[in-house]
């Protein structure tokens, strides 16, 4: 447990991760409190397709709704679904990858084959087929995202579990008679925290993009206000042909900002956990950046370089 | 030589299996859903088709009486004959005809932009790795990530608005102007090119960063190896070092990634086509979703899956030619 807390503390000290966390924090807070600050996003507030003004900061859309309210409200459902699907994707990925990597042999062959097939199947058409058959709604979106997203993370986590499962501490646990389930869940997975965290973030980024794409196609619940349906209505109301850029730019920029913030957090995790980057950073601090970056991984000797 | 045949054969078997899984998914998904799949699937056909014709169509998708396994074989039988059923939104055209009318546009648009962005991104990636600089890195990587964070179709919307609507440099929609006759004449070719510039630029713009970063990272790890140090010590020319020694090896993981990225980029291309009303698979996909055209949807899924599998096989063969380690 101590490890986990330490990891998060050092993450907040990393510059890239800090910027990412700030951006993400702002979006999460505003989306939570949006319903308290501004009115309902589906109300008719004024003439449709008004350009941004002091009254309506982001203008109005084709149905005379306040785009600012829609952007803030949209964040709520979109982010919730993205984080939830990110969590579930990693859960499924960690389970299947963990089982495959730990037990190996036949079971690994079958799961690996499944992983490789799912990695090849083109995501969007598969998602569209699933979503078209299921009743529209958030649950459908989550099912679809997990079904199409788990394979990549299962593959990454599998190879890491494989490395661990031959190490002494795992062999020792086996000798002590610990169950396989306990070894995977308690001994191995917590040691892979940075990898799991970055998988979770990657899956969340995927969750945002894929979700918005599906809803943009009209496969979400179009009566709800999300970032995807905002873009759906923007094209449906011919925003492109009437030149009303303000109906889709705020939503698109928000999507990109949130994805960027998550990517930055992932960079931070990488810098903290990737041994090559760690030693490079220490060496660069010590030598004022004057060393050949292109040669073999610099190795930091203990007590040799002070941090 | 024998080894390479076995390698290609194994890959081929794997792709067959993947294709088979896609077909099975296509078969199973409707049947796992709540409600009666046959009546959902053909609800739009009511009144359009005679009862006998509807029964024939149901049989195409294996909705016959009998156990699931028999239905499955029925479905496979029709599929292997190239019978994907009849499209609802383009009634009474068969699905195969509808799809093949859009396939060339998608292959043309996505194929050319993919190749351009791969080549361009890889070349820039080589230089980025060679001139590695902390300041440039700390600026460039977040910028590229930021651009990559936009959904494909959103970039498409922005480009369409600025270059199509405001500046009026490029046409707003469709693959060619309605005033030219399709064929091998200059007007038609110019029209096709000018219509494809914006959508192609969108696809290149969004995917370029990924190729740049992956090539840069491959190059950096190659540049750290002993044989490059040795070549440096010998005093080889910078250009030879960069392109002949380092880049050729660094390219291999990128080419492997090419096959993997294909499905992802194709998905983005489909959404981009929708923005530009480009008459490819993406546009058909949208029509199919709007009209609840399940036969067309399933046909598009299979077509795109098989194009991805085929391209992966081609990538494997290219890798075999490029990487002697696979042959040994």
Image: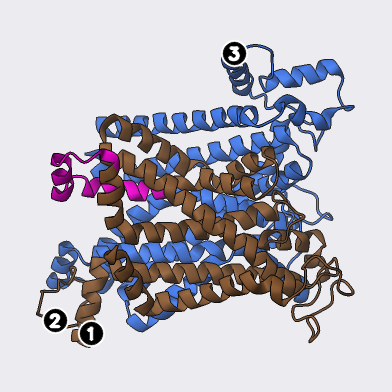
SS assignment at label 2: loop
Q: Residue at x 66, y 19 (%)?
A: B62
Residue numbers of the magenta segment = A153-181
- Spatial CA span between label 2 and label 3: 71 Å
Q: Is residue A271 above or below residue A84?
A: below
Residue A172 within the segment the image draws in magenta:
yes
Q: Is residue A129 left or right of residue B287?
A: left
- Marks 2 and 1: in contact by CB < 8 Å? yes
**Image quadrant where one finds the C terminus of chain A:** bottom left
Is B285 situated above or below A54?
A: above
Q: In this orientation, which residue lies closer to the viewer: A187 or A13?
A: A187
Between disc 1 and disc 2, whose residue precedes?
1
Mark 1 sits on what residue? A285
Contact, CB < 8 Å: mark 3 with mark 1?
A: no
Instruction: Pick the residue in front: A111 or B55.
Output: A111
Identify the hue of chain B: blue
**Residue holding disc 2:** A305
């Amino acid at each position: 447990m101590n490890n986990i807390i330490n990891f998060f503390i050092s993450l907040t000290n990393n510059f890239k991760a800090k910027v990412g966390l700030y951006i993400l924090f702002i979006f999460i807070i505003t989306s939570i409190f949006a319903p308290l600050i501004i009115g309902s996003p589906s109300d008719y507030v004024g003439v449709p397709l008004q350009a941004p003004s002091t009254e309506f900061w982001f203008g109005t859309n084709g149905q005379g709704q306040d785009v600012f309210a829609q952007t803030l409200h949209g964040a709520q459902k979109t982010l919730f679904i993205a984080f939830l699907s990110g969590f579930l994707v990693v859960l499924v990925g960690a389970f299947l990858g963990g089982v495959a990597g730990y037990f190996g042999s036949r079971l690994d062959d079958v799961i690996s084959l499944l992983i490789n097939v799912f990695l090849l199947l083109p995501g969007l058409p598969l998602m569209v087929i699933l979503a078209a058959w299921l009743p529209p709604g958030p649950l459908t979106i989550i099912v679809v995202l997990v079904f199409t997203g788990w394979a990549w993370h299962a593959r990454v986590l599998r190879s890491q579990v494989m490395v661990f499962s031959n190490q002494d501490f795992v062999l020792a646990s086996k000798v002590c008679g610990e169950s396989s389930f306990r070894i995977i869940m308690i001994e191995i997975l917590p040691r892979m925290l940075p990898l799991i965290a970055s998988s979770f973030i990657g899956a969340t980024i995927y969750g945002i993009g894929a979700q918005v794409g599906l809803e943009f196609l009209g496969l979400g619940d179009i009566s709800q206000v999300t970032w995807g349906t905002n873009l759906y209505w923007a094209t449906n109301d011919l925003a492109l042909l009437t030149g009303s850029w303000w109906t889709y730019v705020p939503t698109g920029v928000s999507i990109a900002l949130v994805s960027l913030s998550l990517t930055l957090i992932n960079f931070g995790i990488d810098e903290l956990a990737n041994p090559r980057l760690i030693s490079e950073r220490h060496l660069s601090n010590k030598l004022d950046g004057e060393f050949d970056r292109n040669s073999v991984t610099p190795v930091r000797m203990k007590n040799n370089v002070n941090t | 030589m024998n080894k390479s045949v076995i390698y290609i054969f194994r890959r081929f078997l794997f792709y067959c299996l993947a294709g088979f899984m896609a077909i099975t998914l296509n078969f199973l998904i409707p049947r796992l859903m709540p409600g009666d799949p046959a009546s959902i699937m053909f609800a739009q056909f009511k009144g359009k088709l005679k009862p006998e014709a509807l029964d024939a169509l149901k049989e195409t998708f294996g909705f016959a009486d009998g156990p699931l396994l028999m239905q499955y074989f029925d479905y496979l039988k029709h599929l292997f004959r190239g019978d994907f059923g009849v499209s609802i939104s383009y009634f009474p055209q068969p699905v195969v005809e509808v799809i093949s009318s859009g396939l060339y546009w998608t292959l043309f648009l996505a194929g050319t932009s993919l190749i351009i962005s791969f080549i361009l991104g890889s070349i820039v990636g080589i230089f980025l790795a060679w001139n590695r600089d902390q300041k440039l890195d700390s600026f460039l990587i977040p910028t590229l990530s930021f651009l990559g964070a936009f959904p494909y179709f959103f970039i498409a919307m922005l480009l369409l608005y600025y270059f199509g609507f405001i500046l009026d440099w490029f046409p707003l929609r469709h693959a060619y102007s309605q005033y030219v006759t399709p064929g091998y004449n200059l007007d038609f070719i110019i029209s096709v090119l000018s219509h494809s510039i914006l959508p192609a630029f969108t696809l290149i713009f969004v995917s370029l960063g990924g190729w740049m970063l992956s090539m840069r990272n491959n190059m950096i790890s190659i540049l750290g190896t002993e044989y490059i140090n040795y070549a440096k010590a010998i005093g080889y020319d910078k250009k030879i070092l960069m392109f002949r020694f380092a880049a050729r090896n660094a390219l291999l993981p990128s080419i492997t990634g090419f096959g993997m990225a294909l499905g992802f980029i194709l998905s983005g291309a489909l959404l981009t086509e929708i923005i530009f009303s480009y008459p490819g698979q993406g546009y058909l996909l949208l029509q199919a979703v709007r009209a609840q055209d399940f036969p067309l949807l399933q046909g598009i899924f299979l077509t795109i899956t098989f194009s991805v599998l085929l391209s992966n096989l081609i990538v494997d063969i290219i890798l075999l030619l490029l990487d002697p380690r696979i042959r040994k």
